[in-house]
Amino acid sequence: MLAQQKQDITALFQAALAPILAGTEVAANVVLERPRDPSHGDVACNIAMQLAKQLKMNPRELATKVVDALLANPAGKGLVESADIAGPGFINLRVSAAAKQAVVKAVLAQGAAFGTAEAGKGKSVIIEFVSANPTGPLHVGHGRQAALGDALSSLFGSQGYAVTREFYYNDAGVQIQTLANSVQARLRGHKPGDAAWPESAYNGDYIADIAADFLLKKTVSASDGSPATASGDIEDIESIRHFAVTYLRNEQDIDLQAFGVKFDNYYLESSLYADGKVDAAVDMLNKSGKTYEEEGALWLRTEDYGDDKNRVMRKKDGTYTYFVPDVAYHIVKFQRGFTQAINVQGSDHHGTIARVRAGLQAVNVGIPQGYPDYVLHKMVTVMKGGEEVKISKRAGSYVTVRDLIEWSGGGDIGKGRDAVRFFLISRKADTEFVFDVDVALKTSDENPVYYVQYAHARICRMLEQWTGAEADLANVDLSPLTAPTEATLLATLAAYPETLARAQAELGPHQIAFYLRDLAANLHSFYFAERVLVDDEALKAARIALMVATRQVLRNGLALIGVSAPNKM
């Protein structure tokens, strides 16, 4: 049902219950559900079973009174067709055909806005994703984060939230020093496998590329921040570090651009130290009384907040463990006004959740429990030619996002982006995913993104043969839409707004991919069962309107996950 129809039916129940509850202190919470068995009706409600004991009535007797009053209410005319009572007191309603058909006109009227809502109006949320260390190209795990995070951001936006997409750069610490040392080793003429090659160095070809550009004293720029110009001095480790980080940030920008992902803000870990945010966070934790010193290290009593053991904050050598800047960063997020924060990260970050949340509670500055939310994803396995692909020459030890886009598009970046985006959100984040490049290249129903896009293209091709004007469909008579495949399509279209709201609330963008596959399947079933351009003008007009509405919802859903809706395939 459409949201307004659901509200209207809820109001009918409340009106029916009003005289029954008058003079009592009993309150009714009307909840509408879909019957498990569609043959039982369109809407189910167990309100009679909920209230019977409090009202000292037989549930079926109460249900009968509710149904009689509901059906007698003129406000339900044209909406509720019939009602019956099942089992111990379930109330099942059947919605009228006209009410089901109304979704077509709603889609035609709202267009790209169909499915959106204002539940989050006035609320802001920051969604952090990808957040790759600038030590190499983006790998397929980062790609899954990008697909999930961007779709989740769009979902929140569709529900009225003010969304900030943020990329957090871990540009401080041991890994950055390792990057600088790796480039310096290349500058000195060493390569992987040489006796002088550092054991911990990065081995990909990109290290050699950075070294070559450094010697040429090139200038590189990332999406934000100042350009970096190489000094060309192989002993200038600070210049090497700065140039290499900026170089790789630019490379990651290029990867993200190919993937169609844009960020509103970039935040550097190094700025937390430079601005004194890390020291300020440690000071707050010390003042909270939740820290103690033992064996030369500073500890946080994370056990007080549900962690399995207390954690070291500052090691004996005076350096902080990695969760401390994370605590500082999330304090900053809260101070920036984001009362809800979501992090999309790999499942290897699971162990940090308890200690970061513990630190945020310990500082006692009003941050809510459970802040931030986490969406953790499992690994992606890439298959190509029937074999698992583990190594990219460019990266040295893993498959990059750019590899995957190029392979999956057969040289067409747009096609590859669509496939990678759709595939990487087509499973729940907490399930492992096997990405089969050969499937992504198929032009058949085995390829889910092709299957959905072809549904859109099929409608476009159908409408090309029609000589009418879409503007004339606004007042079309939809009553001829009575075929079973039409009823299924109508119900699926009506479920779109609810699907978006549920996917947003459950942080589950995969639900959009599931929905689009169902909608495409129902469109294809209709196409093979019925003709659109029939001689009966009334039936033809109604079916054209249904096709235009279905095309619109396919477009809306695909746009939400960053996938194109081609008119021809």
Image (spheres, rainbow, N blue to C red):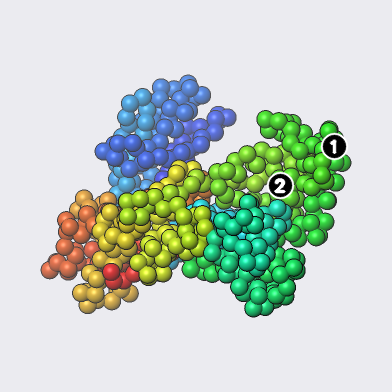
Vertical relation: 568 (above or below) 350: below
Residue at left offset 45%, top offset 25%: 52
Q: Which of the two residues, 425 or 442, is positioned nearer the viewer here?
A: 442
**Residue 65 locus on image (x, y percent):** 39, 32
Q: Is residue 297 left or right of residue 512?
A: right
Q: Is residue 52 left or right of residue 86?
A: right
Crowd band around label 1 with a 10 angstrom C-alpha radius: few (<14), some (14–19), many (20+): few
Q: What label sits on residue 287 in the rendered view?
A: none
- Quadrant the C terminus occupies: bottom left
User: Dot 1 lies on which element?
Assistant: loop
Q: Indicate which disc, 1 or 2, sits on the residue closer to the N terminus.
A: 1
**Residue 520 locus on image (x, y percent):** 30, 56
| Whether residue 341 can be seen here | yes
Q: What label sits on residue 322 in the rendered view?
A: 2
**Residue 359 locus on image (x, y percent):** 74, 41
Q: Is disc 1 in contact with disc 2, using a CB cutoff of under 8 Å?
A: no
Amino acid marked by disc 1 = Gly
Residue at left offset 68%, top offset 62%: 180
Vertical relation: 155 (above or below) 304: below
Q: Which of the two residues, 189 or 347, is positioned nearer the viewer here?
A: 189
Vertical relation: 17 (above or below) 255: above
Crowd band around label 2 with a 10 angstrom C-alpha radius: few (<14), some (14–19), many (20+): few
Label 1, label 2: how far apart the Cα atoms are: 18 Å
**Residue 17 locus on image (x, y percent):** 46, 36
Residue at left offset 23%, top offset 63%: 543
Read off the residue under disc 1.
296
Instruction: Name the front one of labels 1 and 2.
Output: 1
Amino acid marked by disc 2 = Tyr
Q: Which of the two residues, 194 or 338, is positioned nearer the viewer here?
A: 194
